[in-house]
Amino acid sequence: MRVEEPNAAAEYVHGNEDRELRRILLQAQVYAPLTEGVLRSAGLKPGMRVLDVGCGAGDVSFLAAELVGPSGEVVGVDREARFLARARQRAEARSLSHVRFVQSSLEALPVGAPFDAIVGRLVLMFQPDPVSFVRRMAEHLRPGGVMAMHELELSAMGLAHPKLPLFNRVWSWMLPTCERTGIKVHMGLELVSTLRRAGLVVDDGVVGGRLGVTPDAETTHALVETVRTLLPHMERLGVALAMEVDIDTLAARLTAELRASQGVLVPSLMVGVWGHRPGPV
């Protein structure tokens, strides 16, 4: 997602090509159980109207749609037409008549009937001013309504046991690249303060990650595809050379490292936080 802010633009550094769409779908498959847990814990239930900000190809919208059921409604909003076209195709294939998608920036989205819940995954980390962004999100939320955000804590750099030298090297490329391209690498652990500063009451939160229990797990491939999309920025910033990363063999090398160590891998950690808009219900 790329969202324009007043006097600034938060560029979606991963780009918008077909390969990126495939990466997003793979990433969504990895994160789905974690995000579903956050939405359930936040209190999404049948009959709710939900706004999914930065919906991309619709994965979080579909998770919300399962929880609110056909008596509820989910509206996904994003600026990228290509992602929204895929989201609409997927909603039609699932016969989800209570899910619709709108092409708009959050700033341009008209404030109409307030929503019972607002959700977002991997949105705030790309915003120049996350607090202002959450404040604008809250304008679409009814008093007492819930907001649930799910973001990466990139500074944690994932977990591996036993130590995996190549995995550590991958993060030595990724973390400075993300920092220098303006991505908020502490966004996960800053969610609580961000929501509070935006005027919300924080209710609770969780930290979690997907465990890669086999060497060729989807978690490994999702990590490699993220490296692939960041590679041009790594080279431009002098963080790593393409020949050093050797992206076309990276998945096989990581897999071999995991197999040789008989280890396990949590490629990244995510933080989910939810709260509500104060005021009379």
Image (cartoon, helix red, strand yellow):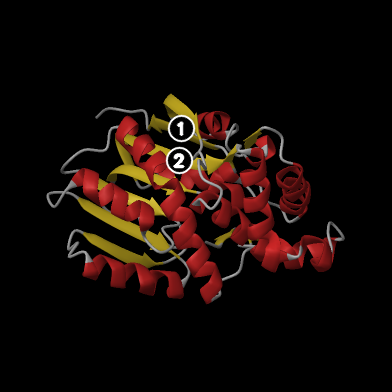
SS assignment at label 1: strand
Left or right: where does residue 34 sit relative to residue 2? left
| Tag 1–tag 2 contact (CB < 8 Å) | yes
| Amino acid type indicated by mark 2 | Met
**Distance in Å between CA atoms under marks 1 and 2:** 6 Å
Residue at which label 1 appears = 273
Which mark sits nearer the N-terminus, 1 or 2?
2
On the question of residue 185 being in view, the answer is no
| Amino acid type indicated by mark 1 | Val
Residue at 46% x, 28% y is 206
Residue at 52% x, 63% y is 23
Q: Percent from the top left, x then y, of residue 245?
A: 77, 61
Specify the farthest residue to the left: 71
Q: In this view, does 18 lie above or below 62?
A: below
Residue at which label 2 appears = 149
Decide which of 114, 64 is in the foreground and name it: 64
Specify the farthest residue to the right: 238
Q: Percent from the top left, x then y, of residue 114?
A: 28, 47
